[in-house]
Amino acid sequence: MARRLLLLLLAAALLPGATRDFLTAEEIDQVRAAQDPNIRVQLYLKFAQQRIAQINQLLSRDRAGRTALVHDLLEDYTGIVEAMDTVTDDALRRKVDITKGIALVTPGEREMLAQLMKVETSAPADMARYEFVLKDAMDVTRDSIDLYKDLGGRALEVSAKDQKEEDARKAGLAPADAKRETDDKAKQQKQEQTRKAPTLRRPGDPPPKGK
């Protein structure tokens, strides 16, 4: 199975103008089926670990064409870790408890970072061809580990980011659009203020004294 996957990756790398996703079609189906973010982050962790194992397998032997494969696998790994962080941010935004998934993700990411650092330290002969994506993969993993250290602080960051984007969206509205949005809000507030309070009077009853 591993040999077949490596051959498919090599073929994709050699096709001119070929576009790749950082997940296989089967992996995408698994992610789509996992609605619980705790399960989804665990899936991403498994896929990332598989990429690390494939990289180590390639680097264990000096074979033709491995450089492009290692480069692509590192890019895929980085995309997977970033996707895992996106799932976490979305869960925090929706106030979904994701501690169960993170309990497994954190040690897994630490181990993967250690594996990437070993690759850098071993300095393979062809490392110059994928050194940039290797460093990027390590940086993204470190950032992800930091993300999981303080979920409360991360939730505040997500909220602040959303508010900043909303403010920027409003600031970017055309004057007419901005005025329309302001007028709509004012109209809504006026309607709420003038809305009649509920009454127990029946039709034809005289109004209460003093009214």
Image: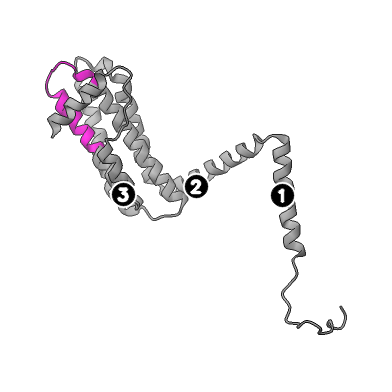
* Separation (CA) of disc 1 from disc 3: 40 Å
Q: Pick whichever, 3 or 133, lies toward us.
A: 3
Tell me the quarter of the image containing the C terminus: bottom right
Q: Which residue is mark 2?
A: 156
Earlier-in-chain disc, 1 versus 2: 2
Q: Position of residue 179 (x, y in %)?
A: 74, 41
Q: Does the rendering let one see residue 125?
A: yes
Question: Residue drawn 27% across and 34% down?
Answer: 113
**Crowding at mark 2 (Cα within 10 Å: few <14, some 14-19, many 20+):** few
The type of residue carrying mark 2 is Leu
Q: How many marks?
A: 3
Quadrant in the rendering for residue 63: top left
Q: Which residue is mark 3?
A: 33
Q: Position of residue 94 (x, y in %)?
A: 46, 52
The type of residue carrying mark 1 is Asp
Q: Pick whichever, 70 or 123, lies toward us.
A: 70
* Separation (CA) of disc 1 from disc 2: 30 Å
What mark, if any, has residue 184 been given in the picture?
Answer: 1
* Up-down relation of residue 104 to residue 76 (above or below): below
Question: Residue drawn 35% across and 50% down?
Answer: 37
Q: Is residue 114 left or right of residue 89?
A: left
Q: Are marks 1 and 2 in contact (CB under 8 Å)?
A: no
* Separation (CA) of disc 3 from disc 2: 29 Å
**Crowding at mark 3 (Cα within 10 Å: few <14, some 14-19, many 20+):** few
Q: Which residues fall within the magenta stretch?
A: 48-68
Q: Secondary structure at mark 1?
A: helix
The type of residue carrying mark 3 is Ala
Question: Residue drawn 74% across and 47% down?
Answer: 183
201 is within the stretch colored magenta: no
Earlier-in-chain disc, 1 versus 3: 3
**Front position among marks 1 and 2:** 1
